[in-house]
Image (cartoon, rainbow, N blue to C red):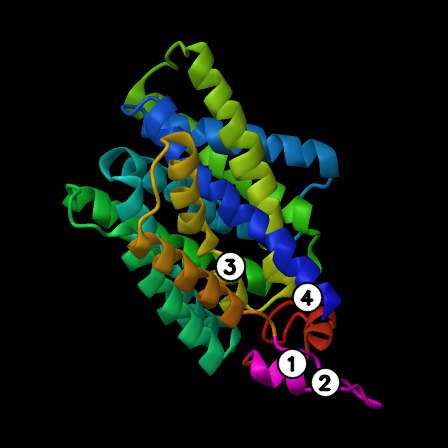
Amino acid sequence: MEANVRWVALTAIAPVAWGTNYFVTHEYLPADRPLSGAALRALPAGLLLLAVRGQRPRGAWWWRSAVLGLLNVSVFFVLVYVASQLLPTSVAATVMAVSPLTMMLIAWLVVSERPSATHLSGAVVGLAGVCLMLLTGVEGVSVPGVLASAAAMLMSSFGYVLAKRWSADADVLASTAWQLTAGGLFLLPVAAAVEGPPAALSLSEILAFVYVGLIATALAFAAWFTGLRHLPAGTVGLIGLLNPFTGVLLGTAVAAEVLTVRQLCGLALVLAGVVLGRPARAGRRGGGRTRTRAVADGRPGSGEDSARDPSRCGPG
């Protein structure tokens, strides 16, 4: 159980960092260069992790890195960038809050992780909390922005589950580096063709890109994929609800906003949803592997068995 708490805490770094990303992108990054912005976010982060880990892809990981780079990085970053510029943070975060349910469904179909009743309950409670917390009805909504945010949510949910299925035999930092590097390399020529030569950046934009690249990308994605390696997809998806939770607290801290009773109730529901998604306590171990945690998480075998056998439902 202590190990599970450790993995949950590590995974939570990602949505907390992403919760600040909408604000930084919206306030400090150029709105008219989404492709260049996405490339400058992904490629330096990927190269940094590649330098830290020093491993190149081998075998199937060449094409897997390309596929995951497109899903989790290239297309996803562009869509998030567009959504950040077209939508209020509250609306974009609310659309992305549907991702736990989406991830559970995709994980069920792709890696045979049947969602448990507590995971489903947590997703519904958490989504209700996000809506209560953020949807006030006073902000304008851009239809293209909503479509971009929804597409990003679907794309990333599928990409994350694929990464969970494929990454049992790969180092987490290395596979994260490959995805980010591949995604950034895909974006560079497209950005140059569509948006032209790179524009000069102000000091505030450079600092914003450094933060987005190091914290909201390199650190966040490494933590997120580590969580997917060790936790059920349903648990990881519910931890992602800390993204809008962080956004609300950031608005309170930066803009000196006062939390209303409605928002406080929403925050409480979000936390309740995350708690409901925590991994089940492992039962006593006999001569073989316990099935208690696996059954509660909707998996046919234990996490340790899955880690040894990549053909099983997913990493443990």
In screen coordinates, is 105 left or right of 142? right
Of residues 188 and 275, which is closer to you in this image? Answer: 275
Task: Give the Cα separation between the discs numbered 1 and 3.
Answer: 18 Å
In screen coordinates, is 209 left or right of 311? left
Find the magenta span and give its range.
280-297
Q: State which tag comes first along the sequence, 2 or 1.
A: 2
Amino acid under disc 4: Asn
Q: Dot 4, how many residues are within 10 Å of its Cα: few (below 14), some (14-19), or many (20+)? A: some
Q: State which tag comes first along the sequence, 4 or 2.
A: 4
- Vertical comparison of 229 with 67: above or below: below
Decide: marks 1, 4 in contact (CB < 8 A)? Answer: no
Decide: marks 4, 2 in contact (CB < 8 A)? Answer: no
Amino acid under disc 3: Ile
> Where does residue 252 sit, x and y in percent of width and height?
39, 38
Q: State which tag comes first along the sequence, 1 or 3.
A: 3
In screen coordinates, is 153 left or right of 137? right
Which label was assigned to residue 283?
A: 2
> Tag count in the figure?
4
Decide: marks 2, 1 in contact (CB < 8 A)? Answer: yes
Decide: marks 1, 3 in contact (CB < 8 A)? Answer: no
Where does label 3 land, which residue?
A: 239
What is the secondary structure assignment of the residue under circle 4?
A: helix
Task: Give the Cα separation between the discs numbered 1 and 4.
Answer: 11 Å
Q: Dot 3, how many residues are within 10 Å of its Cα: few (below 14), some (14-19), or many (20+)? A: many
Which label was assigned to residue 4?
A: 4
> Where does residue 27 sit, x and y in percent of width and height?
34, 26
Where does label 1 land, which residue?
A: 293
What is the secondary structure assignment of the residue under circle 2?
A: loop
In screen coordinates, is 120 left or right of 7? left
Task: Give the Cα separation between the discs numbered 3 and 2.
Answer: 23 Å
